[in-house]
Image (cartoon, helix red, strand yellow):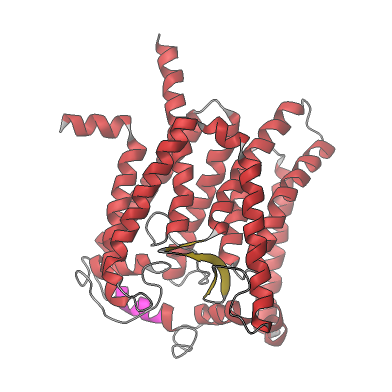
């Protein structure tokens, strides 16, 4: 018992990742009766476990080479991912007009979005890795900008923001053109957190909040009073999801069945749930977007709170690592990833509760999916390297 306590105290991030791995694999196994698009859903939990093992290998490699090597090579990785994203956009808009299904080899369209390369045995989603790469690149730009500028002025801050936007907007636009708005939102939140930690004056964020508020207000006005115009702006799959969120019961036979059936499932689960692999109502994407609904259905309020507790513990540990580091580049990186994680957690659980629109945003480290998990494992590897550097600094201070 003392050895376990010592391990948890010395390696809290590793311990919480083990907990999240167990929760994730078990939750995916619980979702198996609801999964219809896979030939062998009972084995998806094992694939998720394999993804975690591959993630451990990634963490090991990052800790061997060190974060500095990752920062140095980030523009090469950024360029490669930009090419992959551009090819998917090309396929998304040209393939429908040609007799072939896809003009780009291995390109794959799922749920209206062409965001994956289907490789033997698994799918690869470049946008998931790009979101991590963008935060790493912004951390580097921010550190270099702060080192170069001794006195902050409006012009210097505007120049810094423009440099950041030059890195962020091209991939964000490509991801949006793939019809994957969820990842775009995640990227933008990460950008905001990096900018906030950079030391920019508060007026920039005030202006940003005003712009976001105006967009939301205009959208609400159009939806209520000018629905025809709203339908021209928000079209296709996004519009269906919006109406399914606003009125799940009224659209139960079409857009709202996923949310409404999940609400019925976990809404009757009580304190301890309906039990292992219970199926109250069928709803799609149980292993990905709606994995928290599966947990709450099977193990009720208690199961949901245990999962939430593990996620909050992860957030606190990451935030602590960021506060303790003396390396500003690492600090900016930690803040960006922290913002992304918290945003995904809040949005995913919020949309399952019916509080936020369904956007395809998954629950990090819990939802099934290799690209999302492995991309965040890159971040975990960098966090562990930062944590070890923090420990070295503490040891030097002691001696």
Q: Compared to 363, does 60 lie above or below?
A: above
Q: Residue at x 24, y 69 (%)?
A: 298
Give the vertical position of 153 relative to 269 (above or below): above
Q: Position of residue 329 (x, y in %)?
A: 60, 32
Residue 167: horizontal and vertical position, in percent?
71, 48
- Residue 388 is one of the magenta-drawn residues: no
Quadrant placement of the N terminus:
top left
Q: Residue at x 41, y 66 (%)?
A: 288
- The front one of 130 and 149 is 130
Magenta segment boundaries in residue numbering: 260-266
Of helix, strand and loop, which mostly describes the magenta segment? helix
Is residue 274 left or right of 231 when viewed as pictured? left
In this view, the residue farthest toward the left is 1
* 12 on left or right of 276: right
Residue 152 seen from this side: yes
Q: Position of residue 293 (x, y in %)?
A: 35, 69
Residue furthest top in the image: 399
Q: Quadrant of residue 352?
A: bottom left
Left or right side of 137 for 346:
left
């Amino acid at each position: 018992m003392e050895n376990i306590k010592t391990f948890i105290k010395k390696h809290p991030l590793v311990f919480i990742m083990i907990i999240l791995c167990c929760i994730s694999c078990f939750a995916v196994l619980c979702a198996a009766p609801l999964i219809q698009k896979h030939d062998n859903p009972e084995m998806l939990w094992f694939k998720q476990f394999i993804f975690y093992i591959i993630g451990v290998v990634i963490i090991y490699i990052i800790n061997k080479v060190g974060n500095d090597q990752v920062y140095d090579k980030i523009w090469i990785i950024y360029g490669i991912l930009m090419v992959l994203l551009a090819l998917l956009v090309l396929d998304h808009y040209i393939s429908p007009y040609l007799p072939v299904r896809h003009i780009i080899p291995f390109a794959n369209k799922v749920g209206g979005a062409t965001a994956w390369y289907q490789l033997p045995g698994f799918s690869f989603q470049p946008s998931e890795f790009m979101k991590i790469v963008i935060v790493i690149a912004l951390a580097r730009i921010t550190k270099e900008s702060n080192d170069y500028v001794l006195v902050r002025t409006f012009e210097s801050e505007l120049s810094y923001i423009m440099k950041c936007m030059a890195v962020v907007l091209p991939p964000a636009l490509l991801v949006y053109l793939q019809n994957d708005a969820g990842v775009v939102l995640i990227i933008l939140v990460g950008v905001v957190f990096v900018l906030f930690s950079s030391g920019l004056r508060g007026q920039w964020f005030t202006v940003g909040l005003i712009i976001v508020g105006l967009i939301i207000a205009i959208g609400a006005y159009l939806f209520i009073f000018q629905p025809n115009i709203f339908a021209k702006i928000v079209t296709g799959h996004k519009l269906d999801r919006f109406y399914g969120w606003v009125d799940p019961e009224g659209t139960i036979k079409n857009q709202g069945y996923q949310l409404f059936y999940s609400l019925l499932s976990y809404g009757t689960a009580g304190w301890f749930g309906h039990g292992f692999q219970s199926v109250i109502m069928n709803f799609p994407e149980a292993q990905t977007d709606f994995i928290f609904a599966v947990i709450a259905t099977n193990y009720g309020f208690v199961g949901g709170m245990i999962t939430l507790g593990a996620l909050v513990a992860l957030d606190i540990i990451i935030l602590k690592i960021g506060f303790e580091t003396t390396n500003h580049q690492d600090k900016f990186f930690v803040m960006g990833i922290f913002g992304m994680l918290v945003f995904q957690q809040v949005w995913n659980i919020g949309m399952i509760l019916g509080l936020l629109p369904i956007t395809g945003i998954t629950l990090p480290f819990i939802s099934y999916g290799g690209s999302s998990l492995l991309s965040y494992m890159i971040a975990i590897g960098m966090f562990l390297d930062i944590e070890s550097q923090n420990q070295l600094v503490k040891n030097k201070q002691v001696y």
